[in-house]
Image (cartoon, rainbow, N blue to C red):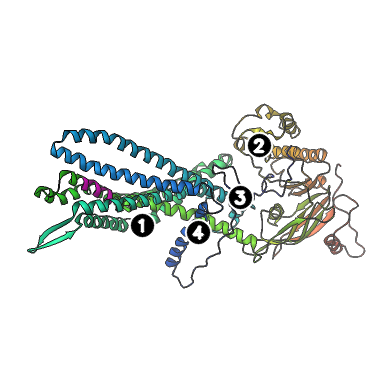
């Protein structure tokens, strides 16, 4: 088996992940940076102004992390690919200029009936087209390479922060705009990294094209003299002036018509994410829904969620209709405008047919460059919404990270025990993220080989205490200490079953091939799942196939493979009948006689498998440890709290008590 040290786990033995690297295409190291300082809104702002300020900051927050791709801790190929893309854009504009000149030459030759020049230019056209196609193809490849590597780098960075120190779990415990983090990381982050590359490439291409072909328009068109009110009025560079005015009108129209595009697009993305989450929730809880006959209620919930999606899509469709009115109209009118403007000069003989066609081509290119906003406003709005959603998740992670580095709320410390104690809780207090106490002043010391049962009524904080021991619950005070070089394994009430083969599920969190097949089958035999041995290499939806009791048995099989030194059981036998529960507990004691056990459970029958029992009692101001008693007589050093509690429990004179509990098999 793997010889790695098992630290406090989040679920079923999974380690709280640090900000390490996962295999990624960029093969670069993601540098862990401190979170930005928290920005408090100006109290003098109105709610609407505060919301606008928040949205502006969200975009800023996205770029704080995203731009590091080109920084010291980013991808080493980021700048070479970016510079290469700029060079390709410049070369593409050069080929466009060549085709523009070719237009003038071919139409002038046709006007002169110059067959030789026509044939020559026809031959020249082939390499021009091939060169343009080659440059554009390579440009697309490089652009998509940047997008892919940037997405890989930023996704790895966000996932590393999301998984670090159990933050993926802690997000469920705090308020904030971070719903559906999986959709934000997978879909919103994809759009947030793809669109900026397209936009920047488009803007640079548009700028170079506009700069180049404005000169062409100015040179070809020259000045236009028009009689206005009986006086000749000369307009220098009339084609350039017309192109600028035309683009200004269309861009302004687009900005006015699509001013709600960002808000509508953001609402649509949120509705889609909520619909996906609802569908996933139904799939993951299919068995419970089916057993309860809750299909109709789930259908109503899905219909309501999907109705919101359709409503947001309808609003977005209206925005698209309005913007299409402008963009399509512009596309139809733009090619005609330069021909009409050049017609007087052509008819009077001061402009050749080739010049007219060259001007028309240049005008279309300039108009396309100036009309970049018209064509890309919907995508810009979609990017805006996606960038804000991923930035909201980043801000929530920022808050958790700052809380880890701050003592304002108090943090539970984790360290090593002194002496031979396997686990000690020193003045441990557990609180909510707003400071409300859940468990207070808990002091427990567990020696090697002890089997301790934690009891108490529902809501007394037992599971919260377990989360604090695992390192998932950070808020509180005091410390949780483990013996150095000892391995801890946690079994929650609902064991995690990963996708893949049954062999992988049994070996988790180790790799499926970490143990020989015979050892895995033997572990299944010992927990009463031998009838699954024939399916051990079968890839199936085991999380949906196995019953709750089978999942808990499988979790005990993991114990036999990993052989930890400390086991924490959080209602780990709740789905088993009493007889099966006894078999599992007895099996653990027989197979792992030296293991230290900390159990959280309600069933009184479990006392026989433990040597000690501590009880939590819910009180105003937080649950407290009210008793710590031996279930079997042993020679051990009692801690201070135990002696104090024992003294408090001492009856008045003339009254005797007996030790609670019985014997357990050793």
Q: Is residue 78 visible?
A: yes
Q: Using the image as rendered, state which of residue 27 and residue 657 is in the foreground.
A: 27
* C-alpha span from label 1 to label 3: 36 Å
Task: Return the mark for residue 241.
Answer: none
Question: Looking at the image, which residue sits at the far left?
Answer: 230
Residue tagged by mark 4?
61
Give residue 663's quadrant in the image: top right
Find residue 142 and report its horizontal and vertical position in percent. 44, 43
Disc 1, SS: loop
At x 30% / y 59%, what residue is drawn? 256
Residue tagged by mark 3?
163
Q: Earlier in the sequence, mark 1 or mark 4?
A: 4
* Crowd band around label 3 with a 10 angstrom C-alpha radius: few (<14), some (14–19), many (20+): some
Q: Nearer the observer, disc 3 or disc 2?
A: 3
Q: Which residues are magenta?
A: 358-367
* C-alpha span from label 3 to label 4: 20 Å
Give residue 246's quadrant in the image: bottom left
Disc 4, SS: helix
Residue tagged by mark 2?
505
Main SS type for the magenta part? helix
* C-alpha span from label 1 to label 4: 22 Å
Q: Is 363 covered by the magenta stretch?
A: yes
Q: Using the image as rendered, state which of residue 533 and residue 299 is in the foreground.
A: 533
Task: Return the mark for residue 260.
Answer: 1
């Amino acid at each position: 088996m793997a010889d790695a040290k098992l630290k406090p786990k989040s679920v079923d033995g999974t380690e709280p992940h640090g900000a390490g690297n996962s295999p990624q295409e960029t093969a670069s190291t993601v540098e862990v940076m401190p979170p930005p300082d928290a920005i408090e809104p100006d109290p003098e702002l109105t709610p609407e102004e505060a919301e606008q300020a928040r949205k502006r900051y969200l975009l800023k927050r996205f770029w704080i992390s995203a731009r590091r791709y080109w920084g010291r801790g980013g991808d080493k190929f980021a700048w070479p690919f970016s510079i290469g893309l700029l060079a390709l854009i410049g070369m593409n504009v050069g080929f466009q200029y060549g085709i523009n000149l070719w237009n003038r030459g071919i139409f002038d030759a046709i006007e002169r009936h110059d067959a030789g020049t026509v044939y020559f230019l026809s031959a020249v056209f082939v390499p021009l087209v091939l060169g343009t196609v080659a440059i554009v193809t390579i440009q697309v490849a490089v652009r998509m390479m940047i997008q892919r590597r940037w997405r890989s780098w930023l996704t790895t960075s966000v996932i590393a922060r999301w998984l670090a120190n159990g933050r993926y779990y802690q997000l469920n415990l705090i308020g904030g705009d971070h719903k559906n983090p999986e959709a934000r990381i997978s879909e919103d982050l994809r759009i947030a990294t793809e669109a900026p590359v397209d936009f920047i490439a488009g803007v640079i291409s548009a700028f170079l094209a506009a700069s180049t072909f404005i000169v062409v328009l100015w040179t070809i068109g020259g000045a236009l003299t028009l009689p206005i009110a009986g006086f000749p009025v000369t307009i220098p560079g009339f084609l350039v002036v017309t192109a600028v005015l035309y683009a200004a009108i269309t861009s302004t129209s687009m900005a006015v018509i699509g001013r709600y595009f960002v808000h509508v697009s953001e609402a649509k993305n949120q509705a889609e994410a909520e619909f996906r989450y609802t569908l996933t929730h139904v799939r993951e809880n299919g068995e419970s829904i089916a057993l309860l006959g809750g299909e109709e209620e789930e259908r109503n919930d899905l219909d309501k969620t999907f109705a919101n999606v359709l409503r947001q899509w309808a609003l977005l469709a209206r925005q698209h209709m309005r913007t299409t009115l402008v963009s399509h109209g512009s596309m139809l009118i733009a090619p005609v405008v330069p021909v009409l403007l050049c017609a007087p000069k052509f008819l009077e003989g001061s402009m050749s047919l080739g010049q007219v066609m060259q001007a028309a081509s240049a005008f279309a290119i300039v108009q396309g460059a100036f009309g970049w906003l018209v064509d890309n406003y919907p995508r810009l709005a979609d990017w805006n919404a996606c960038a804000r959603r991923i930035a909201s998740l980043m801000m929530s992670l920022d808050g958790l990270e700052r809380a880890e580095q701050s003592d304002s709320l108090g943090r539970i410390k984790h360290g090593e025990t002194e002496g031979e104690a396997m686990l000690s809780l020193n003045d441990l207090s557990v609180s909510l993220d707003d400071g409300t106490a859940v468990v207070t002043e808990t002091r427990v010391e567990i020696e090697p080989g002890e089997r301790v049962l934690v009891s108490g009524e529902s809501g007394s904080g037992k599971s919260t205490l377990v989360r604090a021991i695992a390192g998932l619950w950070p808020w509180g005070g005091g410390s949780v200490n483990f013996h150095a070089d000892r391995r801890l394994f946690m079994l929650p009430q609902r064991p995690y079953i990963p996708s893949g083969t049954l062999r992988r599920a049994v070996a988790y969190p180790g790799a499926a091939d970490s143990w020989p097949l015979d050892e895995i089958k033997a572990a299944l035999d010992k927990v009463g799942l031998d009838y699954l041995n024939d399916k051990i290499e079968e890839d199936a939806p085991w999380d949906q196939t196995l019953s709750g009791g089978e999942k808990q048995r499988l979790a005990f099989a993991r114990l036999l493979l990993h052989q930890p030194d400390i086991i924490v059981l959080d209602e780990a036998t709740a789905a088993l009948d009493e007889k099966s529960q006894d078999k599992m507990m007895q099996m653990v004691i027989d197979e792992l006689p030296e293991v230290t056990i900390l159990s959280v459970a309600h069933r009184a029958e479990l006392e026989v498998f433990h040597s000690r029992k501590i009880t939590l009692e819910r009180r105003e101001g937080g649950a407290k440890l009210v008793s710590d008693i031996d279930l079997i007589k042993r020679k051990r050093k009692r801690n201070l709290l135990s002696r104090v509690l024992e003294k408090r429990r001492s009856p008045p004179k003339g009254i005797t008590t007996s030790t609670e509990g019985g014997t357990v098999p050793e």
